[in-house]
Image (cartoon, helix red, strand yellow):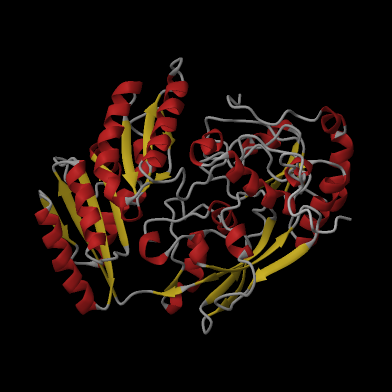
Amino acid sequence: MVAIAMPKPDSSVMGRRDEIVAALRAIVPGEGVISDETGMRPYETDALTAYRQMPLIVVLPETVDQVSRVLRYCHENGVKVVPRGAGTSLSGGALPLADGVLLSMMKFNRVLDIDFPNRAVVVQPGVTNLGITRAVEHEGFYYAPDPSSQIACSIGGNIAENSGGVHSLKYGLTTNNVLGLEMVLITGEVIRLGGKHLDSEGYDLLGLMTGSEGLLAVVTEVTVRILQRPETARALLVGFPSSEDGGRCVAEIIARGIIPGGLEMMDKPAIHAAEAFVNAGYPLDVEALLIVELDGPEAEVDYLIERVESIARKNNASDLRISTSEEERMTFWAGRKAAFPAVGRISPDYLCMDGTIPRKELPKVLARMRELSEKHGLGVANVFHAGDGNLHPLILYDANKPGELEAAEAFGADILRLCVEVGGVLTGEHGVGIEKRDLMTDMFTEDDLKQQQRVKCAFDEKHLLNPGKVFPVLHRCAELGRMHVHKGKLPFPDIPRF
């Protein structure tokens, strides 16, 4: 059962279920509509598995026209729609609604065009991150954003959450690597933003869509930039006697103007879990471990390695190894990439949090996190993108023990409040979804949230796309658009009113 409040199901829609199923089957024939309980069961949750909810119906369209007609039907008949990619969201962004259509885009899984001269690839939203790289690596190119779930997560879902990965420090998040979109509005209108060109005139609607969490439109085609593989890439594996030492090292590397291709950090529980899982050769007698990857021309990489080594030793590094081969570099990364599933071996359940802080606050936040761990009586393993301050605390709990899920949620909320307190934000790449929805007021004022909702209203006046996500309280569009009267006077009284 879902423990958090979601929009109350519309009984009139629930009562029309058979009619809605029949109408959608006319649009998406064959096996494109799933309405039996067993068939819908795989869609009841996403990667935030603590929360589950069966959808009203599942629809799997195969063409843009089908997406357009499904959305138009839902708009005309007041039926909510939850867009879904690969279901790897860690914030509950794809959690279904009891009175809503779950629109799965995973049949949109083709690479449509590879354009090496323009360094661009056009794909459907169901193509995975790794799938893009696989399509272009024979020419020495790759797609930079690489979340830990890159083998499974879809590019459409990455756009919804503005996902990043271990190389986002130097090469950017999804928003920095998307050039164009084709998307369908809730009214069924199909529009295009951007293209293979570098930038567009007018408002940055492409930036607005990236990270909009399925609240504004359904993406049906994506144009991404691809990059040439660097000439050289080498990694340093650096152990520290304390997380504070590691945090200071991270801050100094960036302060010296060095931007690594990847800069990741793990604490002791995560190190031990990852090493037991993949045998990467990690030191087990350290409290924190940094993986620093430097890439570019060979001479530059050699020079930067010397500088980073000097900074690390100045910050009390107790163990330091430098990769001497591509195989060894990949081994360094193997444990980090497998850290999330590895932690699953040491705890029956865990919540993977996501918050971002200023880099200089790393030592302070890690120390406070240990205090919070004692306060809530739960363990925590830290795995995060240290270079850009994006934390991923893994809160360890057992859902079969009464009260532990609630304690884990409270622990997670305290961590996110701490991120905001030190000048950070609630999320870096997982999105708000339902997980952080009720914490939005800790970061934004009511006026801030209303202004964001006005954008939602411009795209989806009836609030049919993914309701219940992101906003703790959703105002009616008519309320948000109402003229404000202050002390009995309208603003700008000299302007003619019609």
Residue 449 appears in view: yes
At x 42%, y 43%, the residue is 355
Image quadrant of residue 44?
A: top right
Residue in the picture at 20% in, 55% down: 237
- Above or below, comparing residue 17 to residue 493 in the picture: above
Across and down, in percent, residue 289 comes to 22, 47
Of residues 189 and 340, the one drawn nearer to the viewer in this rendering: 189
Q: Quadrant of the C terminus?
A: bottom right
Residue 57 in view here:
no
Answer left or right for 388 relative to 492. Answer: left
Farthest-out residue, bottom: 117
Position of residue 319 in the picture relative to residue 76 (left or right): left
- Residue 252 relative to residue 223: left or right: left
What percent of the width, then of the height, locates residue 247? Answer: 23, 48
- In front of the other: 406 or 15: 406
Residue at 14% across, 59% down: 311
Residue 249 in percent (x, y) is at 19, 53
Q: Give the position of the N terminus as an image quadrant.
A: top right
How many numbered circles are shown?
0
Q: Quadrant of residue 62?
A: bottom right
Can you give x and y, in whole percent of width and height, for residue 226 in the image?
A: 48, 72
Instruction: Give the quarter of the image for residue 193.
Output: bottom right
Residue extending furthest toward the top: 402
Residue drawn where x is 82% and y is 30% of the image: 14
Taking depth in this image into account, of 202 and 382 the one nearest to the observer is: 202
